[in-house]
Image (tube, rainbow, N blue to C red):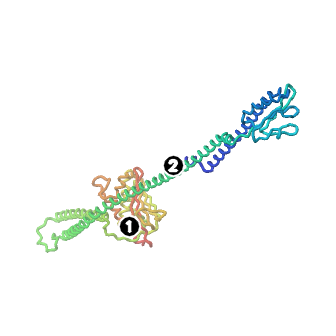
Amino acid sequence: MNAHANLQAYRFRPVMLLVAAGLLLIAGALAAAYQYHSARVERRHQLVTQANILAASVTAAIAFDDRAAAQEYVNALMLDPRLDAAAVYNEAHRQVAGFQRAASEPIADSLAADGRAPHQRQLVEVPARQGATTVGRVYLRAADTPLMVQLTRYSGVALLTIMAVLMLAVLAVAQGVLTRANDALHRRATELADANERLNIEMAQRARTEEALRQSQKMEAIGQLSGGIAHDFNNLLMIIKSSLTLLQQKLLQGDPSADGTPASPPRERGSDDGREAREQRIRHYLDVAQDGIDRAASLTQRLLSFARQQPLSPRSLRLDVLVRDIRPLLEHSVGSGVEIDYRLDSHRPVLCDANQMENTILNLVVNARDGMPDGGRIVIGVDDLRIDADHPMEGLPDGDYVHLRVVDNGMGMSEEVRRKAFEPFFTTKPVGKGTGLGLSTIFGFIVQSRGLASIDSEPGRGTTIHIILPHVPGEATPEVA
């Protein structure tokens, strides 16, 4: 990403290329003009030097009017192709010697009436002196530079300028191709990154879905198994309980027959004290049997609740009123070492079984107490909750809900324990201290009531149990609440 940004910042822009090309053209033109000016100055300097040499050579010939000697000096200059014409004049402004190329006009045609040469860049005038006396004048005119020579002279600068402009053009094209390729690569990298992120999200969602499916299948299988066992077990318990009840009635009436048939004539009995002791033993045995049956029936109800097949009597009630009604029971259950803070801010009714909800709240409070062996503080909160597009919650449709939470500041749970807390027969308590059906029973009851139960916990930071139930229209009646 940084490399792409740097390339974007430093790549050539079309305006920059145009400016650079214009500057190169201006520089080339200035170089050509400088070269042209330097060549003119150098050529005039050479022309003046040749004129001075010729003037020094023909001074004697002019003084003695030796035209042949003067012409020989002038003819020697004809070998220089850069000279177009030459002329030697005496002091009387009469030509002593001279020459001009073919198709060139004589120098005399360019001179003024007084013999002065006009200001021309190709014509120079030099006086011929003998001592301090001027005996004549020498005129030299340079030939025009051929076009090919001029082109050859300035072709180097032009070629360099053109090459520089072409290099800029090639660089611009290459830069454009590189920029497009880099942009395409960047887009491709961004698309791959987005696709990889989507794939990771989909893989995570798929893993969560598979885990939830396995958990649901496991819970469903265990629920079906426990439901079938609980139904059969409950039927057997009802038979046993009915038989024991009848037996107890018969024994208390002095009739040992359990089927209602007439009793045989009584045998001789002992004292009243012996009969009373026997009856106490019989009551004790029956009470023990009755207590075992009650425990088995309670276990059966837990299995049915876990299997979500227990018979419920849902009614409209307000959880805040329900908590207030069982407040003495809750405080008695946790003891003096634990403080309970009530935060009951909800006024919406829900539809659930009041007895099962009381057992649920009591069970959660007792679990919170067990998680604080050194004492602590429990918060029981009930408030209203709105679930919609702005505040979604997985597993629940949009609508109005009531949120019950039980918070403690105890030992908390590890992540592994938190994930397994709602599983049946899972417990962290010692053997004989718990069946592992408490939270699973609560979970089954809440799901059966069309609600949601969840746990938030970290080691050393306490535990929060969330129960969310759908709001039902209308107010709960005082009798139910």
Q: Nearer the viewer, residue 7 or 15?
A: 15
**Is the residue 134 above or below the residue 367 in the image?**
above
Q: Residue 450: which numbered mark, if any?
A: 1
User: If you read the primary sequence from the N terminus, does the residue marked by circle 2 or circle 1 appear first?
Assistant: 2
Residue 61 place in picture, x, y as percent? 83, 27
Type of the residue with mark 1: Arg
In the shown orientation, is residue 198 left or right of residue 435?
right
Q: Count all numbered tags in the image, as a single digit.
A: 2
Quadrant location of the C terminus in the rendered image: bottom left
In depth, the one of 69 and 32 nearer the eye is: 69
Rendered image quadrant of residue 203: bottom left
Closer to the eye: label 2 or 1? 2
Is residue 51 shown to the viewer in this render?
A: yes
Task: Rate crowding at label 1 as few (under 14), some (14 to 19) or many (20 or more) other CA atoms within 10 Å.
Answer: some
Residue 205 position by quadrant = bottom left
Q: Which residue is mark 2?
A: 1
Q: Which mark is residue 24?
A: none
